[in-house]
Image (spheres, grey):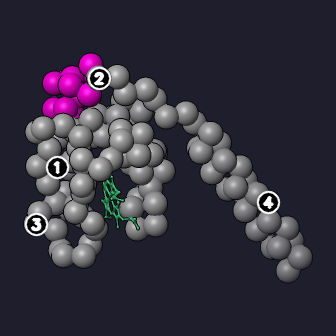
Amino acid sequence: MRLALIVSLLVLGMFALAVRAAMDEPIPEFSDELLQDAEMIALGEQIWQEQCRACHGRAAYPGKAPKLKPSRYTPEFVYHRVTWGFRGMPGWKDIYDERERMAVTIYVLSDRFSP
Ligand code: HEC
């Protein structure tokens, strides 16, 4: 019984450290040039179709996820949500690498964005 407690405390501690390490990862810089990059926009659109539309898309079940309002967001905000998630929004850190997470951020903020 006591061993189980110690093991759970250890696991919890490791988990807390991992979360901390993740939070410490810096947010990359989004230059104006990068925000216009056609290749990044195209890659981001692909990721949007694959993963994000199911919850945020026009055809998603109402109430599943909020309708995105890109004009209100900074790239850093979107990247942060995409990377670490928030409440019902899953984080994608272990699924997409930094470039891919940047691409979907850039797509959401681009003129091509269509939920
Ligand atoms: C499983 C459903 C689901 C998927 C898949 C999903 N999201 Fe979300 N997302 C949510 C929910 C729910 C919220 C609201 C979280 C909250 O604020 O409580 C959210 C919030 C957000 C926000 C913040 C919106 C705001 O106005 O506060 C952004 C930006 C976002 N998601 C982008 C994305 C992107 C980009 C993807 C694809 C990589 C994605 N989401 C995939 C469910 C999802």
> How far apart are the alpha carbons under marks 1 and 4?
39 Å
Q: Residue at x 70, y 55 (%)?
A: 16
Q: Indicate which label's residue lies in the foreground, 1 or 2.
A: 2
Q: Which residue is mark 3?
A: 59
Span highlighted in magenta in the image: 33-44
Q: Return the disc, 3 or 2, that comes first in the chain's sequence.
A: 2
Q: Which sits earlier in the primary sequence, circle 4 or circle 2?
A: 4
Residue displayed at 26% across by 28% down = 35
- Secondary structure beneath dot 4 equals helix
Disc 1 packing (10 Å; few <14; some 14–19; many ≥20): few
Classified by dominant secondary structure, the portion drawn in magenta counts as helix
Q: Amino acid at mark 2?
A: Asp
User: Taking 1 as reference, is 18 above or below it?
Assistant: above
Q: Quadrant of ligand 1?
A: bottom left
Q: Nearer the viewer, mark 4 or mark 3?
A: 3
Residue linked to disc 2: 32
Which badge, 3 or 1, is on the more N-terminal residue? 1
Label 3 vs label 2: CA separation?
31 Å
Q: Kindly identify which numbered label has been placed on residue 10.
A: 4
Identified at 46% across, 60% down, the residue is 86
**Residue at the image position 27 percent from the left and 66 percent from the top:** 66
Q: Position of residue 22 (x, y in %)?
A: 59, 44
Report, in whole angstroms, how far the alpha carbon at label 3 lies from the one at label 1. Answer: 12 Å
Residue type at the position of mark 1: Gln
Mark 1 or mark 4: which comes first in sequence? 4
Q: Nearer the viewer, residue 73 or 23?
A: 73
Front residue of 31/21: it is: 31
